Image (cartoon, helix red, strand yellow):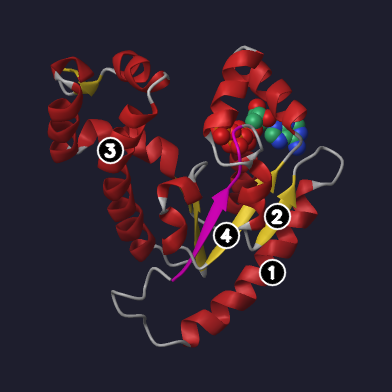
Amino acid sequence: MLRVGLTGGIGSGKTTVARIFESLGIPVYNADTSAKRLMNSDEKLREEIIKVFGANSYKGTELNRSFLSSEIYNDEKKLDKLNALVHPVVFRDVKSWAEKQTSPYVIEEAAILFESGSNKFQDFIIGVTAPEELRIRRLKKRDGKTEEEIRFYISRQMDEEKKMSLCDVVIQNDERQMLVPQVLAVHKRLLELAKTFSKKDPPSEETSSL
Ligand code: ATP
């Protein structure tokens, strides 16, 4: 199974692009929403989060989102600690999800694909990019966040230019170039790639993430 990553900074339009791939019959795994789900449903993960962040991090079995957000908001070390607990659980979850799919390729959508190390599990990576001012305008409208907050979140992610340079292909979501033809071109390329990929011997456990 060909595994494809889809990444881009906040507000770049990953989910918008992912929906177009879904309309072409390609299954999409959203790493951010899955991480939130797993923090509630995975008992072992819950225990580990409580060990590090204290009993206040949950209300019963439900993640205390506002407490945890305030803990990590201005503390990069704590954010790293939380990520170190959550990411391996997401990696396992997406792997078992991908193995159940029957499409020529699957997509994992993740804002922090490179930052989390999830890029090493992908065979091909799509970047989505948009000018920063446009991203800020979109997020103000979608989330009602202030410009300051949005710039703070952007500053915590990998530099946009660097991120895009690490991708195999970049989709421009600048509201000038149409999205659908760009997605169709990538889809065609991936279908071709999937054909050659399925002819290969199944990779060993060690190399399956390359
Ligand atoms: P996040 O990382 O914050 O989840 P994202 O990269 O997934 O963001 P989207 O949610 O797809 O980005 O897009 C952000 C907002 O911008 C949404 O409200 C979306 O509807 C809007 N948007 C994205 N692309 C376009 C476009 N080409 N034209 C108009 N609006 C757009």
Q: Residue shown at 17%/28% (left/top)?
A: 52
Between disc 3 and disc 2, the foreground one is 2
- Give me the C-alpha separation between circle 1 and circle 3: 33 Å
Q: Residue 101's spot in the image, x, y percent?
A: 40, 63
Q: Which residues are magenta?
A: 1-10
Task: Determine whether, in the image, residue 195 is placed left or right of residue 29.
Answer: right
Q: Badges 3 and 2: C-beta atoms under 8 Å apart?
A: no
Q: Determine which residue is flagged by label 1.
A: 188
Q: Is mark 3 within 8 Å of ligand 1?
A: no
Between disc 1 and disc 3, the foreground one is 3
Is tag 4's residue or tag 3's residue first in the polypeptide sequence?
Answer: 3
Q: Quadrant of residue 203?
A: bottom left
81 w.r.t. 200: above or below: above
The kind of residue tagged 3 is Leu
Q: Determine which residue is flagged by label 2.
A: 170
Between disc 1 and disc 4, the foreground one is 4
Q: Determine which residue is flagged by label 3.
A: 38
Between disc 4 and disc 3, the foreground one is 4
Q: Residue 160's spot in the image, x, y percent?
A: 65, 42
Q: Residue shown at 39%/87% (left/top)?
A: 201
Q: In the rendering, which numbered label is found on residue 125? A: 4
